[in-house]
Amino acid sequence: MFRDRQEAGRKLGVELEKLRLENPIVLALPRGGVPVAAEVARALNAPLDLAIVRKVGAPENPELAVAAIVDGDPPDVVLNREVVEAYSLGDDELRDLVAKERPELERRRMAYRGKHTPLEVAGKTVIVVDDGAATGTTMKVAIRALKRRSPLEIVVALPVAPPETLTDLAGEADWTVCLSEPAHFRALSQNYVNFPQLSDDDVIAICNEAARARNAKACLPKVGNGFGSKTCVKSKPEAHRANPKDRDAL
């Protein structure tokens, strides 16, 4: 159990340092992943940004994701092919559903980033961080959108997730790093002593502080003893080179 998200992030940072990742950037899944990712970015002296994902609900069942929009320039739409086929949705219907969610994605982007553009991920090692994962769906969407932007490698970094979710994510990313894999995973909050809800203002404040801290910090050489932790799992090399026909499906 972690005291809070900050402690989880510091522990993740220790494990990630051991990998000696090349040219890393850290992307947080807001809101809960932001304080975790800020500590990871601090440990690696890496820039911090957000992977903003907005779910697109199915007709008359908004909790069921038919697609997701991932912020970018331009934004990426990742489809859940199984749900699309189950609802027999045509292209026009999909466009309408996606269009309804774009204003909220834009609102979040403006709230979190203002006029700043997302970090360039091409040729970079991208570490995607959340405060945990139950099913891993949001993380998977973010990974599949990022693959289209030609990163060097994608690393999933989580404090806690059930084993079956990690197995699923290992097929998507180049590396998965997880500190705790409870066999009987229930609520994410049960893995933290303090697990407060975060607001948009909290996200903005953490990101601003991370940027100030990095700008004030001298660049330090990476340290670590190499890959030797049981919490780190090398994913399948071919996972990063998905079939283009399949890469837009959840």
Image (tube, rainbow, N blue to C red):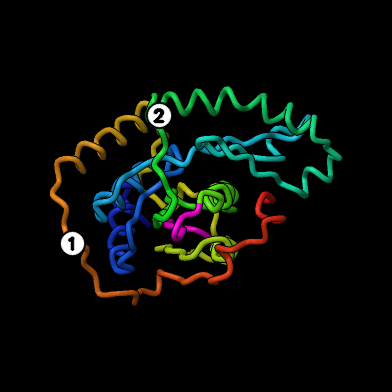
Q: Can residue 164 be seen in this view?
A: no
Amino acid at the residue labelled 2: Tyr
Q: Is mark 2 on a helix, strand or loop?
A: helix
- Camera-side mark, 1 or 2: 1
- Crowdedness near tag 2: few (<14), some (14–19) or many (≥20) residues, C-alpha within 10 Å: many
From the image, tell me which residue sits under label 2: 112
Placement of 222 over or under 77, stated as above or below: below
Whole-percent x, y for residue 16 in the image: 33, 62
Placement of 234 over or under 133, stated as above or below: below
If the image is split into quadrants, where does the N terminus sit?
A: bottom left
Amino acid at the residue labelled 1: Pro
The quarter of the displayed image where residue 170 is located: bottom right
Residue 101 lies left or right of residue 160; in this view the side is right
View extreme (bottom): residue: 228
| Magenta stretch bounds | 150-162
Q: Which residue is drawn at 41% across and 44% down?
A: 120
From the image, tell me which residue sits under label 1: 221
Placement of 29 over or under 221, stated as above or below: above
Query: For the image shown, how many numbered marks are present on the structure?
Result: 2
Q: Pick whichever, 55 or 231, lies toward us.
A: 55
